[in-house]
Image (spheres, rainbow, N blue to C red):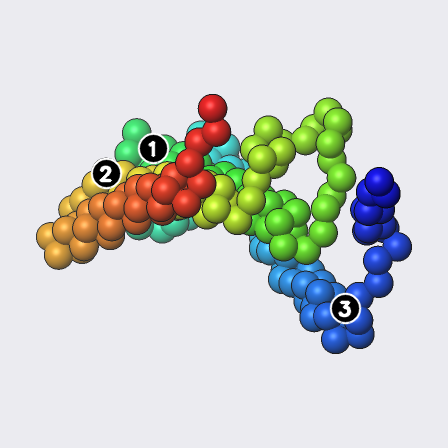
């Protein structure tokens, strides 16, 4: 009995219209290149703030004033802008640097995971630097990881707000807390829906 020969996918040819539609995925490439440029801007911003911190640690009043402005530090009426670093300023600036790193990680997830999922395979199997999460990434996993990354970024912003709470009114504090809770429940809902649609394999 003759068994049917499996189709040779390597030599399969798409009709012109499906081929055009499939090739349209490359229109996303400029978007990912733009995100790479945005990543470069974040790197430059990170180093500017880090240089200000180092200069302020060595007594530069100009750097201290720049940090106070960057972290939106509250200045009590009748007092001048601080001329020396204090614990609050260092903590707020370091949290800002952590925030930049977390957003940068989010950009990497979107760039690498999105390109791998929606544009073209990178063929990184066996590469020593292949990210652990990339080996099992798909659209659902990417959504969950992005949601958890956004929660982390929101937590940093909320912590910065609470540390510098006198600068904000009660409505702003309540609103930011509420938004963070909404992000948290949204991530839980996304993860739960993903678990329902694709249950764990034993």
Q: Position of residue 99 (x, y in %)?
A: 42, 41
Rounded to the nearest whole Å, what is the CA distance between mark 1 and mark 3? 54 Å
Horizontal placement of 146 versus 196: left or right?
A: right
Horizontal placement of 111 versus 121: left or right?
A: left
Q: Secondary structure at mark 1?
A: helix
Rounded to the nearest whole Å, what is the CA distance between mark 3 and mark 2? 55 Å
From the viewer's side, name the closer residue of 164 and 104. 104
Q: Which label sits in the foreground, 1 or 3? A: 3
198 shown above or below 34: above
Q: Secondary structure at mark 2?
A: helix
Horizontal placement of 106 versus 61: left or right?
A: right
- Mark 1 or 3, nearer chain start: 3
Q: At x 58% / y 35%, what residue is drawn? A: 136
From the viewer's side, name the closer residue of 77 and 52. 52
Q: At x 14% / y 51%, what residue is drawn? A: 174
Residue 163: which disc?
2
Q: At x 18% / y 55%, what residue is drawn? A: 175
Rounded to the nearest whole Å, what is the CA distance between mark 2 and mark 1? 9 Å
Q: Position of residue 138 (x, y in %)?
A: 56, 44
98 shown above or below 202: below
Would you name the residue on which mark 1 appears? 91
Using the rendered view, name the quadrant where residue 124 is placed. top right
Q: Residue furthest right?
A: 11
Q: At x 36% / y 51%, what residue is drawn? A: 69
Q: Residue furthest bottom?
A: 17
| Residue 131 in view in this figure | yes
From the viewer's side, name the closer residue of 142 and 92. 142
Residue 19: which disc?
3
Q: Residue furthest front?
A: 1
- Mark 2 or 1, nearer chain start: 1
């Amino acid at each position: 009995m003759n068994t049917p020969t499996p189709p040779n996918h390597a030599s399969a040819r798409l009709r012109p219209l499906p081929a055009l539609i499939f090739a349209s995925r490359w229109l996303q490439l400029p978007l990912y290149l733009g995100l790479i440029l945005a990543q470069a801007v974040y790197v430059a911003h990170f180093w500017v703030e880090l240089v200000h911190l180092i200069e302020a640690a060595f007594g530069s009043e100009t750097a201290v004033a720049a940090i106070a402005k960057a972290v939106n530090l509250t200045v009590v009426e009748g007092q001048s802008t601080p001329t020396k670093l204090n614990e609050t300023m260092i903590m707020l600036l370091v949290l800002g640097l952590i925030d930049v790193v977390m957003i940068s990680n989010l950009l990497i997830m979107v760039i690498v995971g999105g390109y791998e999922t929606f544009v073209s395979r990178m063929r990184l199997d066996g590469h020593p630097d292949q990210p652990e999460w990339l080996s099992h990434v798909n659209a659902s996993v990417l959504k969950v990881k992005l949601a958890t990354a956004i929660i982390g970024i929101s937590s940093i912003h909320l912590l910065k707000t609470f540390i510098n709470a006198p600068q904000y009114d009660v409505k702003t504090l309540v609103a930011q807390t509420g938004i963070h809770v909404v992000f948290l429940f949204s991530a839980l809902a996304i993860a739960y829906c993903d678990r329902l649609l694709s249950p764990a394999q034993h």
